[in-house]
Amino acid sequence: MPMPKDELQHEYAGSWRTYVNSLEQAVQKLEADIREASEMADACTSEWCQATEHVVDDLSNALFSISEPRWANAEDSAKIKTLKRRVHDLYADYRAASRGGNVNTNR
């Protein structure tokens, strides 16, 4: 019979990984949206720019405020680091797209 602590920790781990995976999907979708917008002339209307900047800010806040649990493994830690780097790069891509420039697609 599993100990209640082990059972709870397993549930926490599953929920935490689901949350991190959801953040990863949001980053992927936003990357695609920004890439698409950078390819269109005058895509960055003030409304689009404001909305995108808010989403980037929210993702950034969510990722940089995550506290890695003590039971997180090396793969979990690497994923968080990678997502933090990606959201940082995403902001640079957003800024380039908002100025009518091209984004870096070599990442």
Image: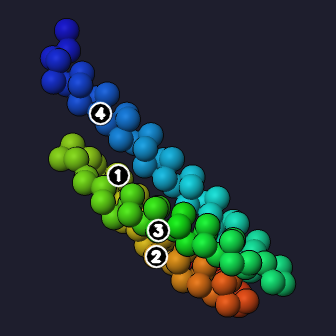
Q: Residues within 10 Å of mark 2 (few under 14, many from 20)?
A: few
As measured in the structure, the alpha-carbon distance from the residue carrying label 4 to the one carrying label 1 is 13 Å
Q: Quadrant of the N terminus?
A: top left
Q: Which residue is mark 2?
A: 88
Q: Which residue is mark 1?
A: 76
Q: Earlier in the sequence, mark 4 or mark 2?
A: 4
Is residue 79 depicted above or below 53 in this figure? above
- Residue 37, given in percent of the width and then of the height, sits at 75, 75
Q: Which residue is mark 4?
A: 12
Disc 3 is placed on an element classified as: helix
Mark 3 residue type: Asp
Instruction: Locate residue 98: give its quadrant.
Output: bottom right
Disc 2 is placed on an element classified as: helix
Q: Residues within 10 Å of mark 4 (few under 14, many from 20)?
A: some
Give the left or right position of residue 40, taking residue 38 as reference: right
As measured in the structure, the alpha-carbon distance from the residue carrying label 4 to the one carrying label 2 is 27 Å
Q: Residues within 10 Å of mark 1 (few under 14, many from 20)?
A: some
Q: Nearer the viewer, mark 4 or mark 1?
A: 4
Residue in front for this viewpoint, 64 or 54? 54
Q: Nearer the viewer, mark 3 or mark 1?
A: 3
As measured in the structure, the alpha-carbon distance from the residue carrying label 3 to the one carrying label 2 is 10 Å
Mark 2 residue type: His
Q: Which residue is mark 3?
A: 57
Q: Quadrant of the C terminus?
A: bottom right
